[in-house]
Amino acid sequence: MAKKDTKLENLSKTVHMLVEEIRLSETEGLDRLFMDVYSQQAGMMMDSRQQGKVKHAFKNILGIVFFGVLAGNDEWEDIYDFAVDERETLKNYLDLKNRIPSHDTMQRVFAIIQPGELQGMLKEILIQMVEMAGQRLDQYLYQNEELDCYVQDIIAADGKKTRHTAKKHGKEPQDLCNLNEFNVMSTEWGVCLSSTRIDEKTNEIPEMQAVMKGLDCRRRIVTADAMNAQKETARVIVQEAHGDYCLERV
């Protein structure tokens, strides 16, 4: 049996996480909402192919793969078969005038995508979907009209060390250490907005500030532990993310 494509396996896990929780909400038109956000983000990705020889648009290939992995397929051939079988449905969302690209074409396109760029696109899609779905629902965890205070979500930021993840015979210094991750969660939606591997626990501080700069936290409260109770972190949350904060103090 051929070895599975690692990039495709990672994409499958990420996309399922991205959609599954908010799919269960009562927001109408979530499929169109997803495609609107997806089209915007996919259109911003770099396409290094020779455009004169291109038959299939970048965002259409990405879209076919997204739908394919959401349907439980984790092999390129299976994604192609899925797209052929579901062509009429996919035409409602994607431009398939040049038919379905071959599984080799899809694999070659994903081979030229930088993992960081793909992960960044998925994160932006998730963040925008959570924000837009929340606006459509117009529901608040807390509201006080007299104080003009409305809270739609709690954004929880925390770093975790996973035990027994170090490689005993690793060649690189970072492989000899347990895995440290910094996660930012939407507690109302139950989804992870950002997950980043950090080398040391103290790297939470700059990572927290970097993630906050990319979020719109209007009508949201950001929570974090004592490590992130920094003046600069509070400034970024208020002035750049436009949110409020509740930071632990020792």
Image (cartoon, rainbow, N blue to C red):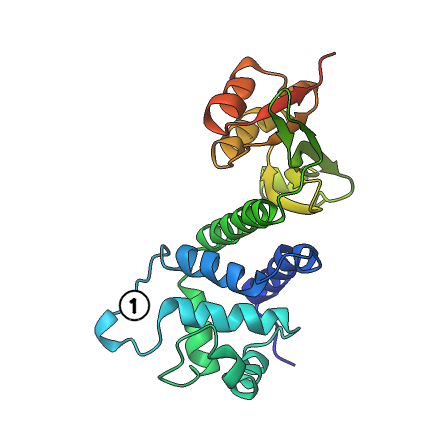
Q: Is residue 80 visible?
A: no
Residue 80 x/y as whole percent: 52, 82
Front one among 181 and 186 = 186
| Residue type at the position of mark 1 | Arg
Front one among 182 and 16 = 16
144 relative position to 93: left or right: right
Quadrant where the image shows the C terminus: top right
Residue 148 x/y as whole percent: 60, 24
- Number of numbered discs visible in the structure rendering: 1
Q: Vertical placement of 138 versus 234: above or below?
A: below
Front one among 127 and 179 = 127
Residue 195 is drawn in which quadrant?
Answer: top right
Q: Vertical placement of 34 versus 95: above or below?
A: above
Residue 110 x/y as whole percent: 45, 66
Quadrant where the image shows the N terminus: bottom right
- Residue under the image location 60 percent in, 44 percent down: 193
Front one among 19 and 26 = 26
Residue 144 is drawn in which quadrant?
Answer: top right
Residue 20 is drawn in which quadrant?
Answer: bottom right
The residue pinned by badge 1 equals: 49
Q: Vertical placement of 61 versus 128: above or below?
A: below
Q: Is residue 31 visible?
A: yes
Q: Residue furthest left?
A: 52
Residue 179 x/y as whole percent: 68, 40
Q: Vertical placement of 18 versus 103: above or below?
A: above
- Residue under the image location 56 percent in, 19 percent down: 234
- Secondary-structure class at tag 1: loop
Crowding near pointer 1: few (<14 within 10 Å), some, many (20+)?
Answer: few
- Residue under the image location 62 percent in, 44 percent down: 138
